[in-house]
Image (cartoon, coloured by chain):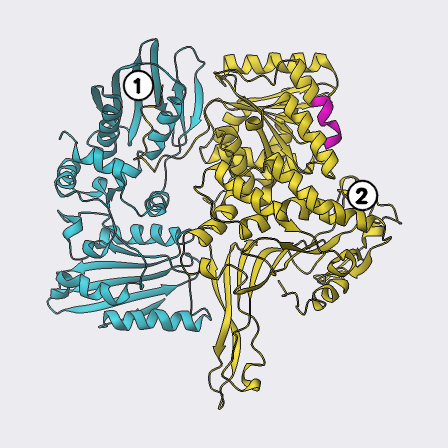
Chain colours: A cyan, B yellow
Amino acid sequence: MIRLEQTSGGAVAAAINAERHRLGSPTTGMVLTLLIIADEDTQSDATGAAAAVARQHPMRIITLIPRADARVSQLDAEISVGGDDGPGEVAVLRLRGELAEHGNSVAIPLLLPDTPVVAYWPGDAPAHPADDPIGRHSQRRITDAAGAQDPWEALRVLKRGYQPGDTDLAWARCTQWRSVLAAAFDAPLGDVRHVRVEGERNNPSVILLGAWLGQQFGATVETVWNDALGISSVSIDLADGLMSITRQDEKTACIVRPGRAEAQITLARRSLSALIAEELRRLDPDDMYGQVITTLEI
Amino acid sequence: MSNPLRSPLDQRLPRIAGPCGMVLFGVTGDLARKKVMPAIYDLANRGFLPPGFSLVGFARRDWADEDFAQIVHDSVREHARTPFREETWQQLCEGIRFVAGDLGDPAAYDELSRVVAELDEQRGTGGNHAFYLSIPPGLFPVVLEHLKTSGLAANTPDAWRRVVIEKPFGHDLKSAQELNALVGTVFDTGSVFRIDHYLGKETVQNILAVRFANEMFEPLWNSNYVDNVQITMAEDIGIGGRAGYYDGIGAARDVIQNHLLQLLALTAMEEPLTFAAAEVRAEKEKVLSAVRLPKDLAAHTARGQYAAGWQGGTPVVGYLQEEGIDPSSHTETFAAMRVDIDNRRWAGVPFYLRTGKRLGRRVTEVAVVFKRAPHLPFLAEAVQELGNNALVFRIQPDEGITVRFGSKVPDTSSIEVRDVTMDFQYGEAFTESSPEAYERLILDVLIGDPPLFPRHVEVELGWTILDPVLDYWAEQGQPDQYASGGWGPQVQYEMLARDGRAWRRP
């Protein structure tokens, strides 16, 4: 790892290139730049998870940590290139003093030319990600409502500020649930009468999953809160009985369908890396998320 | 009724196979154990298989369900690409059944029908079953006949039955036609899936994407700029335990007829109207129909047999010393040939195809070699190290693209131009999330998505091209010996030298 103190964005870019050169691989096939805007509490997990994703999506990861607590403006950087954490390039930048307000000026020289830019806020996000100085560079803007202080308020903000290209990890946490539910309905199950979603109190994924189901089925959705972790179960009243999927442990769920034997299915809780990898797989706007978040009744 | 939870807006949801099961014939073969079973587990592990997916083994063994499950378990532990997870295995295991019986015994098929019906009842497989014939082609007739008479092969409006067959699809045009006719009496065309695992979806889609999604390559993709195309599939291994299959088949039937001609078709075909299966096939069939063999096969084909030698530091025996091989066998383990394509785009551009076993390293690539610049405004010595520009599709390993072009050498007092390469690797080449070819193919079978699977017309066109070469070779006696661990027999170099060209070293 290389440490640079009292440095600049240009010097960090030069240091990354010099390190690449020293390792003997001056050209690389980086596919995107990921900008992580975090505080000291969230930066380490977010950066580590993103670095692991670089195995799938070779990328440059720039973590910006605004530290308005200092008086004097100063940029300090930690740089690592390649190595055991993954093949990507990682620069963790601390922006002190007034510079904390001008992260964009540090990011600009570090963006890889002519490749997509993705912004990721693991904690509190701006009210309008697409209009944020950093969000403006980014074709995909990832927030995490579950990381916010008040998830309900976070969802309301996301709804108001939504622009195509916004996406939220709380939505990505629904994907596996949505996937097994969609698979269950590949065999026609008849009309849906009532939907019940059960899960962790105030968990935004529970809210989004319920909203999606309500929208797709055109049915009312009842939400039941409990003290479990994340989404616990979905039950759907059908003309000929009850269909339900209930999480049993960290890895499996149990599926019940009318006229069929109960079955076990895989439903593993996913790591932050897996969620980020899913987000980076497609860089075009997620229209389904857009539809769900903008029509959320909240 | 369409599924309300699936929407074209929703691009996150993976395609998951609907309710279904698979019946595997030939449970102890290499492919079944090393490829098919692990691929099924990996699909389950990634969540691509439906709840209740069932796998039925069928073989002449005195096994219970648990014994077969143990075989699958061992193969998964050894060969799966995703980590072993007990819970995934448990779910898969609950759907594993075994039917013991002779392939020719009607009673065994009655038992199979009963097991399949029971699975539909217990596991909710919905009557949808794929029959994977991982057995020698000689046994196809008896199995297909029984699948037909037992009613197992019958499609209904609510439930599909499909058949998966592996290469070889015959050993010449006549046998291929017979096989197609036979399969055709039992399954309709849309229910027959021929697996060519070298044509996993990624490869095919990558070649088509590079060619047809870009503007900078296609204008050069013709005889005005292309000098020749070299398609190579080299294996570093010998025949391993496959003596019974390989002897009498040889490299050309094993590889050129299917893999290399498919790669040729993808490289040379015109732009399809859309990427729908029928359109892509139509273009592949057109270009394969335009392939012509040289008149002088002696001058434009080459073959060889690997001799004993050292390969990557290990001593290895020659083909004729392999266990189970007739010491006077004429089967070639290296085959190379020139073909031409009689159409406006490719007239005068030779396509060189070659494949061999026990070569320098494992590599499959398509190299499009461009003409030299019509004029080089440099001193002759400045460009003497400059070769032809080339664009190379690396199919495996390290799937990607290499572009070769001339660049000035720095720090020399006079200008010198030398070849450099620019390399692109598909970022996902090594990751868990990039499915292996077999996984994609098996999932496509279960979903019923046919674009990757060669249709019988393509198979027959392949044999039409190859048969005259095989007939010619059959009269030529023993192939040349070549040292293991190198790049094959000398005759291949002479073959290109006659055309004033040279093979690139892959």
Mark 2: secondary structure: loop
Which residue is painted at 45% across and 14% down in the image?
A261
> What is the residue that sits farthest to the front in this orientation?
B344
Mark 1: secondary structure: strand
Q: Residue B142 lies in magenta, yes or no?
A: yes
Residue B429 versus residue B233: which sits nearer the camera? B233
Q: Are marks 2 and 1 in contact (CB under 8 Å)?
A: no
Task: Give the chain of mark 2.
Answer: B
Residue B380 versus residue A168: which sits nearer the camera? B380
Residue B102 lies, with reference to residue A259, above or below; the image says below
Give the quarter of the figure containing the N terminus of chain B: top left
Which residue is painted at 31% across and 54% down in the image?
A47
Q: Residue A86 lies in magenta, yes or no?
A: no
Residue B431 lies, with reference to residue B89, above or below; the image says below
Which residue is painted at 33% across and 72% down in the image?
A15
Residue A272 lies, with reference to residue B152, above or below; the image says below
Task: Give the chain of mark 1.
Answer: A
Q: Which of the two discs, 2 and 1, sits closer to the camera?
A: 2
Left or right side of B280 for A193: left
Which residue is painted at 39% across and 20% down in the image?
A255
**Which numbered disc covers residue B326?**
none
**Amino acid type at image mark 2:** Gly
Query: Residues in magenta?
Result: B135-143
Q: Name the residue that disc number 1 marks.
A: A235
Residue B50 versus residue A154: which sits nearer the camera? B50
Q: Name the residue that disc number 2 marks.
A: B248
Give the quarter of the figure containing the C terminus of chain B: bottom right
